[in-house]
Amino acid sequence: MLEIDIGGKKVQLDFPEIKARFVVTGIVVVFIAVGLLTSFYTVKADEEGVVLRFGRYEKTESPGLHFKLPFFIDRVEKVEVLRQMKQEFGFGTRGNTNPNQYSGDTEQEQEKEMVTGDLNAARVEWVVQYRIDKPREYLFNVRNADETLRHASESVMREVVGDRTVDEVITIGRQEIESESSRKLQSLVTDYKMGISIDQVQLKNVKPPREVEESFNEVNRAEQERATAVNVANGEYNKKIPKARGEAERAVSVAEGYATKRVNEAEGDATRFEALLKAYQEAPEVTRRRMYLETMQEVMPLLERKIIMDEAGQQIFPLLQLNQGGVQR
């Protein structure tokens, strides 16, 4: 008990009572603060919020500011539904934010070792790209959906690779393997109701075992050189053969045109001769004179300069410029 003098009046203070009041007030303030802080939450633009009430699913909220029951009665699991995630098999990219993106070094070596349908070995590295499209199924239907997806992807890839030869896996069958693996993995994920959508399955490095890798690469180089030589030969063939065919067709067309021309000329000459013969038979003298005049009309312009003199004028030697042409009598 403490006694103090205030304005000449003595007041007694009871410390236990004051302390109890401060404690009660502090508890009330903390209670109100915790209630306020735990009564609202924010969901980002690329997320969806799954609300759990006493650990049981209550509802799914879209992006924005939302309210919930305070004092941790409601708990919110935020799931990134717009983010494209990936899992790497047989290799790993450092510095990622997804803990299930790749496994340890020992597991990576085991993941990539596969047996093909013709009982050959191959080292296959691939990537699975996926999204979470149903947050409720992703959180509650399967324990650790990302880890389950890794096991499912490895199982599907081994099945698909095991149905093909090593040449198909390493060379010509890569695209078919990717599409079939994506389809089968999506079917398996749907059956498990994992809430995951498979965007793509992509093969990265596909190699033979290390012991035969160099020999295999030499075979591939030989195949590529052969393919290059065949393509070059086909290119030369496609360049020269059409050209030769074009020249042959042009020569044939020229010959056919010349033949048609000669035939038409011959037919025209025959027709003209028949017409001339008919005219000659009807009027021989007139026809003969007309033919003579027409022939002279055609021939005379082709001759050089000519001077025709009368035989009766031999006594008089005319003055002529003889250096400009010949003289005929």
Image (cartoon, rainbow, N blue to C red):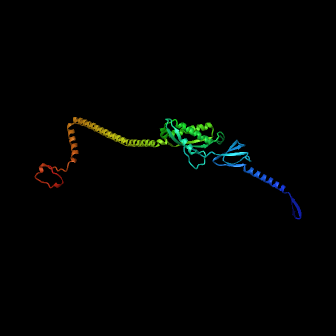
Q: Is residue 112 visible?
A: yes
Is 44 or 246 nearer to us in this picture? 44
Quarter occupied by residue 181: top right
Left or right: residue 260 versus residue 111 is left
- Residue 206 percent location from the top left of the image: 50, 42
160 relative position to 299: left or right:
right
Q: In this view, does 160 lie to the left or right of 228?
A: right
Q: Above or below — where is 121 with respect to 39? A: above
Residue at the outermost right position? 9
Most extreme residue toward the left is 315
Location of residue 128 in the rendering, given as x and y in whole percent from the top left corner: 56, 43
The percent coordinates of residue 240 (x first, y second) are: 36, 42
Instruction: Give the percent coordinates (x, y) of residue 191.
Output: 61, 36
Numbered circles on residues, count: 0
User: Is residue 89 visible from the viewing direction of this image?
Assistant: no
Q: For this view, does 143 lie left or right of residue 215?
A: right
* Nearer-the-camera pick, 199 or 296: 199
Residue at left offset 62%, top offset 37%: 192
Residue farthest along the bottom direction in this orientation: 8
Q: In which quarter of the image is the N terminus?
A: bottom right
Between 251 and 9, the one nearer to me in the picture: 9
* Above or below, 169 relative to 307: above
Q: Which residue sits at x=44%, y=42%?
A: 215
